[in-house]
Image: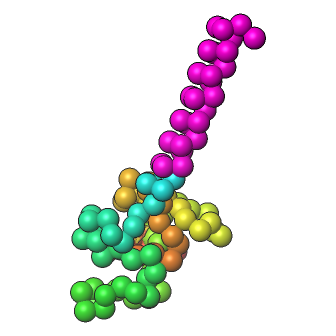
Amino acid sequence: MSNRSRRVFMLHVVAGAGALAAAQVRAEVEKVTESDPYARSMGFKTDTNKVDKARYPRHDPSQSCAKCQLYSGKPGDPYGPCSFFGDRLVPPTGWCRNFKPVKA
Ligand code: SF4
């Protein structure tokens, strides 16, 4: 292998490793968490049963991301994109005060 070929090969290895690392970081960053300041201001919970009843008296445990117009996950997926949170991922069991029921 010539020096040039070796250099090109190493650049591909480094670029591939960087892309993989970036994808892993993005996968973690894309989930909405309860500790996210904006999500917290929206009362976001990953489990609709843990929503603060005193703070959100109109919340009902039957409401969840899976039944929200802004959720586009597929049935059975552990997470799905929420357009309200810029398509970051939320679990179907989640809830926030921007819940918009899917129309029947
Ligand atoms: S907007 Fe809807 S899908 Fe998004 S977090 Fe709130 S309840 Fe869930």
Find out whether residue 95 is within the magenta segment: no
Q: Nearer the viewer, residue 26 or 2?
A: 2
**Residue 95 located left or right of residue 91:** left
- Who's the residue at 27% across and 64% down the image? 38
* Among the 4 quarters of the image, the one containing residue 70: bottom left
Please determine whether, in this image, residue 3 is positioned above or below residue 19.
above
Please determine whether, in this image, residue 19 is positioned above or below residue 97.
above
Q: Nearer the viewer, residue 69 or 25?
A: 25
Residue 2 appears at what percent x and percent y? Answer: 71, 7
Quadrant of the image for the N terminus? Answer: top right
* Among the 4 quarters of the image, the one containing residue 78: bottom right
Give the image's coloring scheme. Answer: rainbow
Is residue 42 in view from this perspective? no
Residue 57 appears at what percent x and percent y? Answer: 28, 90
Residue 14 appears at what percent x and percent y? Answer: 57, 29
How many marks can you see?
A: 0
- Who's the residue at 48% across and 49% down the image? 25
Q: Which residue range is magenta in the image? A: 1-26
Is residue 95 in view from this perspective? yes
Dominant secondary structure, magenta: helix
* Among the 4 quarters of the image, the one containing residue 34: bottom left
Residue 21 appears at what percent x and percent y? Answer: 53, 43
- Who's the residue at 63% across and 28% down the image? 13
Please determine whether, in this image, residue 54 is positioned above or below residue 35.
below
**Residue 1 located left or right of residue 35:** right
In terms of image quarters, where does ligand 1 lie? bottom left
Find out whether residue 23 is within the magenta segment: yes
